[in-house]
Amino acid sequence: MENLENLKSELLAEIAGVSDLKAWDECRVALIGKKGKITEQLKGLSALSLEQKIETGKKLNVLKSEIEAALAARKEVLEVEELNKKLMTETVDVTLPIRPEAQGRIHPVSKIYEEVVAIFGEMGFEVAEGPDIEDQFHNFNALNMPANHPARQMQDTFYIPNKNSDDFDDSYVVRTHTSPVQIRTMEAKRPPIRIIAPGRTYRSDYDATHTPMFHQVEGLVIDKNITMAHLKGCLYDFVKAFFELDEIPVRYRPSYFPFTEPSAEMDIGCLKTKTELKIGAGTDWLEILGCGMVHPSVLKAGGIDPDEYQGFAFGVGIDRLAMLKYGIPDLRTFFESDIRWLKHYGFTPLDFSSMTGGLSNNGGSAR
Ligand code: PHE
């Protein structure tokens, strides 16, 4: 029988030399498996005398448990090592840029839409919608523009024939403004009403600042005791938030819309030079939106008693806001689907607009 002390250090060295779990298992079999070294030693006992059997047997059993303990300890170390190795190779570097092919951009119109919704959402407005193809009742009549009303000519309307009627008054239109959503909202819910309605609008017009399809946001507030002061406060807060300025000069010029009385156009202060337009300072004025107190006939058409409720409304051109805020000179380029244009003027999809996190994220990521 071999010197057990030598055997012990030999086996312990073997265990210490094992470098992964697979090798560990092979080692376990080689030491304490059925044909393992210790097992062989135990088998060898039968050749010894009874006395020697007892003595060596005891020692071998002690050795066996020491080897088992060493194996178990080694296994624990290897398991931790292996787990660490796995964690290292499977780490995700969250600071890496997103996949290079993810290069989509948010169109400035969508960006402004998000900004406007964020601002009015914070003020408690809900987003309302209406169809692009409207009947004349909602686009005109209910808005205090009966057939042959001269104001209908203010808007170069695209008409769509009505298959079921030869009467021109029954033809549809692609809405010339978002104001029909005022009527649809009044038809659908009772005051208090506080909505904005962003969407597409259409007029037969085409130059650097007009395209046949464009975008507006309508605003409508109806409640008891609503006055022009509410309108002014609300729109002042809006332009400040939108242009991300603490102060901004504003003025209201008397105007005319059939569906509001009184009506006004809101201007913001700016500085116009040959090369630059600076908003929020200077002696020039820039028209920004149309607004007014909802006309009593419009409230009636929407089924609301004008003696009980009053309201204000406004309409803003989204595309125009985008041109002003992000310095885009020609509206027609918005709809040419030129990928180079979108890369230049667009916004990365992760630049969310919010009142707390920043509206435009410092003027867009693309520039
Ligand atoms: N609908 C008007 C336009 O398109 C804008 C507007 C909306 C004016 C609401 C007053 C109130 O020019």
Image (spheres, rainbow, N blue to C red):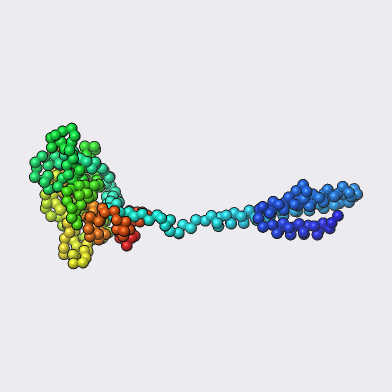
Q: Position of residue 10 (x, y in %)?
A: 77, 59
Q: Residue at x 14, y 47 (%)?
A: 156
Vertical comparison of 166 with 118: above or below = above
Q: Is residue 112 visible?
A: no
- Residue situated in front as seen by the camera: 1 or 313: 1
Q: Residue furthest bottom?
A: 274
Q: Residue furthest top?
A: 164
- Residue situated in front as seen by the camera: 138 or 103: 103
Q: Residue at x 91, y 49 (%)?
A: 49
341 relative to 211 in the view: left or right:
right
Q: Position of residue 103 (x, y in %)?
A: 38, 56
Quarter holding the N terminus is bottom right
- Residue situated in front as seen by the camera: 104 or 197: 104
Q: Residue at x 21, y 63 (%)?
A: 277
Q: Is residue 102 visible?
A: yes
Q: Position of residue 125 (x, y in %)?
A: 27, 46
For the image shown, how many numbered marks are present on the structure? 0
Quadrant of the rendered structure where residue 297 is? top left
Q: Position of residue 283 (x, y in %)?
A: 16, 64
Vertical comparison of 358 with 156: above or below = below
261 relative to 201 in the view: left or right:
left
- Residue situated in front as seen by the camera: 110 or 352: 110
Q: Residue at x 9, y 41 (%)?
A: 148
Quarter holding the C terminus is bottom left
